[in-house]
């Protein structure tokens, strides 16, 4: 570890930012790593691993702590709770770190943070955890299946029930495992009335781990071939894993920061999940099209459309705030996307200048984000049933505005990065019932155990004519 900066202290700061201050985990980790760019790469890797792992497995960490402490984790002072959770994560999941070092460093952290009176408590509980970790009795999967999955995969029980109701208990377990970058050596689940069995080799398991933990990137093949980029990345010591679904996409791992990769700095690489790339693949834009992305930041889908049109046409990428739109503008400059522009606009506000103007409208709308828990673990602790209902309603309100921008004969793409029926299938059904001038072309729910984010995409076609159903108006709202 660095002599001047204690990485474990930075981990505690990150956990406090998330647990106490309500900051989103990926932002808290990114900001901390940006603040300490000068520390050794191994320390940065340690910070990321312990921070992400502790947040991902927080329910399990609290369960383990509860076996050895009379004071439950939720009742502890925030600083002590952060120290204890991160220490237990190291004891449970990081064999390379000696248990004695974990316990000693936790005590030092408590003292340095002004809690010297609790040094005995911290030391005693953690030494007990260290000696008896293997004896912790987890909930029985036969008698308490929901609680067992909740503790094993650190998922709130209400969310386990929801996944189980939607996909069955076996598939639910696979989805929860995938959020943690795990893949059982063999699992079986029902899908579409049939039973599918997956037997995973060690090599395939390692590949899937990179896909879960690595970052998925898209190559701008207008600038450089996929093979050229792959060779360059591997020469930099970066692990590259292709994805057989899209030839221009692969996963990378083993780098320090993205901006140190020349291909990223030059706009040749863009970070985007495979499922998100399927939005443009589903829409199939044609050269010269006019595309409107109504909730675009940071712009991944917009850039993909612009790339697929080979510099022709125009993509207008909009979002609600100047901050979000500036993120798009920064990427436009980095990627040198000449057929793109970014604008501030509230998707709930109708823009008459855009009426029936777009060949394709992209409505990738705000959602509960349950499909990206694998990358933003704190989502599972923040989301509620009420929140899901509110977002489903917001999505309908936006859809009831933005459909008017689609040309007769044009396409509306509705997508979310979640897996709830209210925000996906039910919203599509509602939209089609409200707007008879549209018909469904296709819909697809991607699930996290398919090696991508959980993602929903519906392609909806607007008829050439403007015939309305009796008793409805073109501008009816919800």
Image (spheres, rainbow, N blue to C red):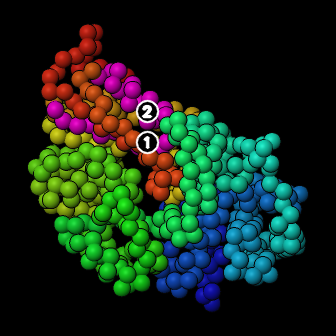
Answer whether residue 415 is magenta in the image. Answer: yes
Residue annotated with mark 1: 445
Identify the element where label 2 is drawn. helix
Marks 1 and 2: in contact by CB < 8 Å? yes
Identify the image quadrant of the N terminus: bottom right
Q: Indicate left or right for 264 with 446 as reference.
A: left
Q: Is residue 310 left or right of residue 187?
A: left
What is the number of the mark on residue 285? none
- Location of the C terminus by quadrant is top left
**Vertical relation: 370 (above or below) 178:** above
N-terminal of the pair, mark 2 or mark 1, is 2
Residue at numbered disc 2: 425
Position of 435 with respect to 159 (left or right) is left
Which residue is at the front of the view, 220 or 402? 220
Image quarter of residue 261 = bottom left
Q: Is residue 429 magenta?
A: yes
Q: Residue furthest bottom?
A: 3
């Amino acid at each position: 570890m660095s002599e001047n900066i204690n990485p474990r202290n930075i981990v505690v700061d990150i956990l406090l930012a998330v647990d106490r201050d309500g900051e989103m985990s990926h932002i808290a980790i990114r900001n901390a790593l940006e603040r300490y760019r000068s520390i050794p790469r191994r320390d940065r890797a340690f910070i990321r691993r312990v921070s992400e792992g502790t947040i991902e497995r927080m329910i399990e960490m609290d369960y383990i702590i509860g076996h050895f402490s009379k004071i439950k984790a939720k009742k502890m002072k925030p600083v002590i709770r952060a120290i204890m959770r991160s220490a237990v994560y190291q004891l449970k999941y990081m064999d390379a770190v000696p248990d004695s070092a974990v316990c000693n460093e936790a005590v030092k952290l408590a003292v340095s943070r002004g809690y010297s009176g609790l040094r005995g408590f911290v030391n005693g509980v953690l030494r007990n955890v260290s000696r008896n970790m293997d004896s912790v009795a987890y909930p029985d999967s036969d008698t308490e299946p929901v609680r067992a999955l909740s503790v094993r995969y650190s998922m709130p029980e209400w969310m386990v029930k929801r996944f189980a109701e939607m996909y069955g208990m076996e598939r639910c377990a696979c989805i929860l495992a995938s959020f943690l970058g795990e893949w059982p050596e063999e699992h079986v689940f029902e899908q579409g009335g049939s039973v599918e069995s997956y037997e995973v080799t060690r090599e395939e398991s390692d590949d899937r781990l990179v896909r879960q933990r690595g970052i998925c990137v898209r190559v701008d093949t207008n600038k450089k071939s996929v093979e050229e980029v792959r060779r360059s990345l591997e020469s930099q010591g970066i692990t590259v894993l292709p994805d057989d679904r899209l030839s221009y996409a692969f996963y990378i791992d083993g780098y320090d920061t993205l901006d140190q990769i020349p291909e990223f700095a030059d706009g040749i690489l863009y970070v985007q999940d495979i499922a998100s790339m399927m939005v443009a693949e589903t829409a199939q834009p044609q050269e010269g099209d006019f595309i409107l992305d109504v909730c675009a930041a940071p712009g991944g889908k917009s850039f993909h459309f612009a790339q697929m049109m080979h510099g022709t046409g125009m993509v207008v990428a909009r979002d609600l705030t100047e901050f979000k739109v500036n993120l798009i503008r920064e990427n436009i400059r980095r990627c040198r996307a000449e057929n793109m522009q970014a604008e501030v606009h509230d998707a709930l506000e109708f823009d008459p200048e855009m009426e029936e103007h777009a060949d394709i409208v992209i409505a990738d709308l705000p959602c509960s984000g349950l499909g990206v828990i694998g990358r933003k673990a704190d989502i599972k602790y923040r989301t509620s049933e009420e929140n899901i209902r509110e977002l489903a309603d917001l999505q309908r309100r936006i859809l009831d505005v933005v459909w008017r921008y689609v040309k007769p004969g044009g396409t509306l793409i509705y997508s979310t990065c979640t897996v709830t029926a209210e925000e996906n299938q039910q919203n599509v059904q509602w939209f089609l019932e409200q707007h008879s001038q549209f018909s469904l072309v296709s819909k697809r729910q991607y699930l996290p155990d398919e090696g991508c984010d959980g993602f929903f995409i519906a392609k909806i076609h607007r008829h050439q004519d403007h015939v309305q159903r009796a008793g409805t108006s073109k501008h009816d709202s919800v």
